[in-house]
Image (cartoon, rainbow, N blue to C red):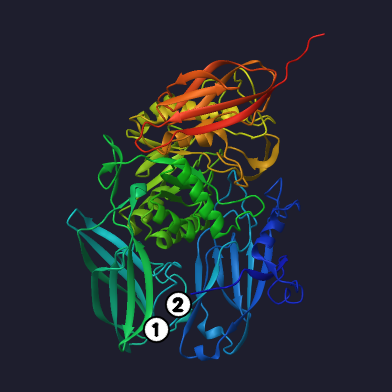
Amino acid sequence: KITIPHTWNALDGEEGPAEVTDKIETAAAAVAATDARKAAKKETQDPHLKKGYYRGACWYERSLDIPAEWKGKRRVFIRFEAASTVAKTYINKVALGEHRGAFTAFCYEITDYLNYGGANQLRVQVDNTHREDLPPLAGDFNLFGGLYRDVELIVTDDVCISPIDYASSGVYLTTMSLDDKRATVQVRSIISNGNHPAKKIKESAKTPGLMENVASSGSSTNTSFVVETEVKDETGITVAKVSTPQQIPLEQTEPVTLMLTINDPHRWNGRKDPYLYTATVTVISEGKIVDQVSQPLGLRTTAITQDQGFLLNGQPYAVNGVCRHQDVRGKGWAISPEDEERDAVMMKEMGVTAVRNAHYPQSEHWHLINDKAGVLLWDEVSLVNTTRSTRAFWMNSEEQLRELIHQLYNHPSVVWWGIFNELELDPMPPCGPELAHMQEVAKGIDPNRIVVAASCRPHRYINLITDQIGLNKYPGWYDKENQPDMAGPINDFNSEVGKRIAVTEYGAGANISHHTEGPLVKPEPKGPFHPEEWQAFVHEQDWAQIKDNPKVWGSFVWNMFDFACKRRDEGNTPSLNDKGLVTHDRQFRKDAFYFYKANWNPEPMVYISSRRAVNRTLPTTEVKVYSNCPQVELTVNGKSLGTVKPGPTKIALWPKVELSPGENKLEVTAISGMPETNPVHDSCTWSLTVEVKP
C-alpha cells in the first residue's frame, strides 16, 4: 500500500472533468484546506440548507507517477477511505465510477488505464449537496465535504487478495467457537485471479452474507496457488497455521475458506486485557509470496441478558460509554491520526469503556486504536431523524450498511451494528419493513454481533425491530423540570420493549466561560447562557439513576467533545453543540469530565468543581469535590474545614463555606487507602468581591 500525499490542486465548482482542467488552481492545497473553505462563512449553494456552510461540488486533482516496471507485472488499485458525500473518480479522463456515501471506503482497479513510466492525471469531484436519495437527510451535525481521509494505491500481483470486496481487506475472520481450551476461527479470503476491470466494483455485491459464494465469469484457464493462514500471538510466536492448494480460473474471483484451531486461547477482554493476535493470509504462487494481508484477531464473546446485562466473555462488564463526533475545531473532519490518538487518551483518562461512533462510521485508524485499547465500539449507518420511501433511498442505505460491516468486520472492538437513530421526525413515511430488511442484512453478513438502534420516543413499533434498543433522553435539559428524572423514562421504555435497554444519549450543554452561584436554576437550552455548573449537576443526577439500574445494560454520554452544528446559536457560541465533556478544540476538560473520571477510573483522583468560577459575589458558598478516594479534606486559606467521605457517586460536599474578601485559596487532599499510593491533591483560587452598600 502506498499512501498518496495529502496535497491536491482544488477548485470549488460543478464543471465537468474536461472544463475544469484549465480552472484548477496551480498551487497545491492540502485536503484540510479545502475542507476548511467549506466550513468558512461562505453561504451554502444548497437550497435545502437554510443556514449555512458551503455544501456543493469541489474538484481535487493531482498527478501520479507510475513506474514503468509495473506494466504487465502488477495490478494497481486506488482506494479512498472516505469522500463526502458523492465522489466521481477519473484517471486519465476515464470515469472509474461514482461512490455515494460520506463515511465508507471505496476502491477501483486502474491497471488498464495507467500511463506506465510517466505521469497520470487523477481527478475526483466530491459533492456534499443535499440529496433526497442519500442518507443522512437530517441531523444535528455538519455534513462536511471533501476528501477528508487517506487515499492510497494498492499494488499486487496478478493473483491477489481482492481489495475491492466492498473496499474491505478481503479477509474475514470469524470466531466460530471459543472456550478456555481452544478457539475455532474461520478465515475467509476473497482471491482474485487476473485483471478484470469491468468487474472491479463490489465483487460480492450479490451475496447477502459472508458465508455465500463469490464468483465472476471469465476464462476457464486455471491458475494454481496456495492460500496460507498463520496466526501469531503478541510475542510473534505462531499459534496456528493452515494452508490449502487452490485453482481459480483466470479473471475470476472466488472465496477461499480455511478453519484453524488455537489452543489455550488468550481472550480479548476489553480494557482489562485487550489481547490481540495477528492473522496473516498469504497467497503463494510457484513458491513465491505474491500477496499478503494481516488483520487483528481478538477472541471474545459478547451477549446481553436480562439477568446480568452486558457480558464480555461470559462475565458482566460495565459499558461506561460516550458518543463521539469526529470533527475538531479548525479542521472539520480532516483530522489526523494524532488527533484521534489524543481523543483516545482523554477517554482512557476518564475511564471510558465504550464509544458510540455517532452518527456514522469513523476511520480505520480509530478502530485500530480501540482494538489495542480494549474499548467497545458501537458503529452505525447514518439513518438519522428521517427517511424517504423511495427505492433509491433504501438501496443507498443498505449499501452503506454492507460497506460498514465488510470494512470493519475484523475489529474485535466492534460489538454493535446500529441501523438507525431517532427516526421520529414528523412527517415521515412508514419504514418498518425497510428497517426489518436492514436488520436481516446485518445479521446475514455478521450473525455474531448485536444489531442495535437508538430511539427518543416510546410506543413505536420500530423500537422492537433490532436485537437491542437504546433510549436517547435529556432530562434536566429539554424538559421543564429542575430535577432531572432519568429513572422514569428508563422504566417506561423498559416496560415497552420487555428487556434491558441502553441509554444511548443523555446530557446538557455547557460553556466553560459561563458560571452561576447559589441555588441552581435550569437554563434555556436554546438560550445564550449555558453554565458549566448546570451541566455537571445534570450528569450527577442522571448517572445516579443509571449506574446500578437493573433495567439498563449500558450508557453513552452525549457527547465526549463539543462538535460543529451550523444550525445552532446558543450558549453564546454560534454553530456549536456544547454538550461535550471536552471543548471542541480539545483544550479544556469540563467539570463533568472529572465527575465521570471519579466514577469510572479507579486511579486515585480529586478535583474541585466550579473552579473556573473565579470571581465570586456570595460570601457563603458550597464547595463540591469529585473524588474516588474514601476521604477528602478541604482547606481554605490554610484552615482545615474537616474531612468528608464522598457519596456513592463520588461527590464530597461542604455546603456552607465562608469566603474572605479578596483571594481565597482552596486546597483538597485525598488519601486513596490503597497500599503504596501517595495522597492526591488539587487546588484553585476564588476571588470574593463584597458589594459595599451606600
Category of crowding for the residue at label 2, using alpha-carbon neighbours closer than 10 angstroms: few (below 14), some (14–19), many (at least 20) = some
User: Which residue is at the far right?
Assistant: 694
User: Which residue is at the far top?
Assistant: 694
The relative height of residue 41 versus residue 544 in the rendered view (above or below) is: below
The image's mark for residue 365 is none
Residue 629's spot in the image, x, y percent?
41, 30
- Type of amino acid under label 2: Lys
Q: Name the residue under label 2.
A: 199
Q: Are marks 2 and 1 in contact (CB under 8 Å)?
A: yes
Residue at 34% across / 47% down in the picture?
272
Q: Name the residue under label 1.
A: 251
296 vs 7, left or right, is left
Which quarter of the picture shows residue 693?
A: top right
344 vs 257, left or right, is right
The relative height of residue 293 versus residue 179 in the rendered view (above or below) is: below
467 vs 653, left or right, is left
- Front residue of 263/377: it is 263
Circle 1 SS class: loop
Quarter of the image for the C terminus: give it. top right
